[in-house]
Amino acid sequence: MNTQYNIEKWAAETTVGKNLFIWKFFLKGKEMPGWELSESYVREDSKNVVVKEYYWGNKENTDQSIKMDVFETSSWKDAQRLLLTLLENHMAINLTEARDRKIELGDVAYTGLGEIVQHILFARANMVVIVNSIGKKDISVDTIAKKLDELFYTIPGPSETGLLPPINLFSVTLDKLYLNQKAGLKIEASDLLGSSAWFKFYSENGEVLKEDGNLFFIPSSRGENQLSVFAIGENGLLDRKTIVLRTEES
């Protein structure tokens, strides 16, 4: 087994990703300025992982193309385990940590070898991404990888369209929350929003995860806490809801 990759170290150094969860993610084509989405596929869809492929071409240079493989897993821990598996599949090739090349990306990220960064793998929250340069001209993919990462962790501005179909319900299923114990989440959105948005959840004091298709929240500190959900469309924020929770000692 490749011993270069230290998943325990990744977990210890992960901050933002532990408090962020991405759900039902997709790209429609307007998210990468200067690039045109030519093809997209759902390669695998199971209870635990959804894998989507995206092919992009540079609008000004047809020799420049990029492929993204985007894996949506059930938790930040599952994402880092998947990243480790993908890195170990490179077998004898030890990839370089992105930050050693002064590339700030994801909770943990690695790049291919060579002066041009044609290959990047990274994990952010419960997402794992592989970005490759696949065109006739070799190009660095760090800029477009960072743009994708920003979609995961930033809070966007209002949608350009002004369309705000609501999140109708956002709540926990338990009357009392206890430290480090799972509480089910309920979220319901209008039909229009449900077909045109993906979601991100964020709490400074807890994490969201998915089990058997259901969403759960695990509080990590006692006292008052806030949990927010953001509905994101291709043009920006469509709706958001925040609930205030109080966590007791178990």
Image: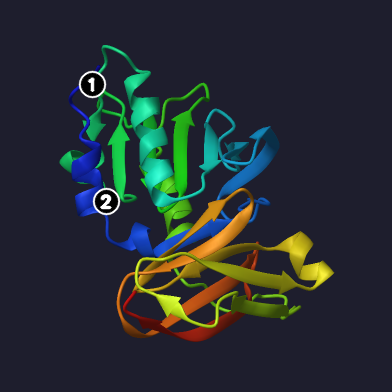
Q: Secondary structure at mark 1?
A: loop
Crowd tier of the residue under label 2, counting other residues whose Cα lies within 10 Å: few below 14, some 14–19, many 20 or above: some
Tell whether 227 sits left or right of 236. Answer: left
Residue 32: give x, y in percent of width and height: 55, 52
Tell whether 47 sits left or right of 131. Answer: right
Position above or below: 174 against 32: below
Quarter location, residue 17 = bottom left
Position above or below: 20 against 88: below
Q: Which numbered disc covers residue 104?
A: 2
Residue 132 seen from this side: yes
Residue at (54% x, 54% y) in the render:
210
Q: Which comes before the other along the chain, label 2 or label 1?
A: 1
CA gap, disc 2 to disc 1? 19 Å
Residue at (33% x, 21% y) in the render:
88
Q: Amino acid at mark 2?
A: Glu
Q: Looking at the figure, which quarter contains the N terminus?
A: top left
Determine which residue is flagged by label 1: 94
Residue 117: give x, y in percent of width and height: 32, 32
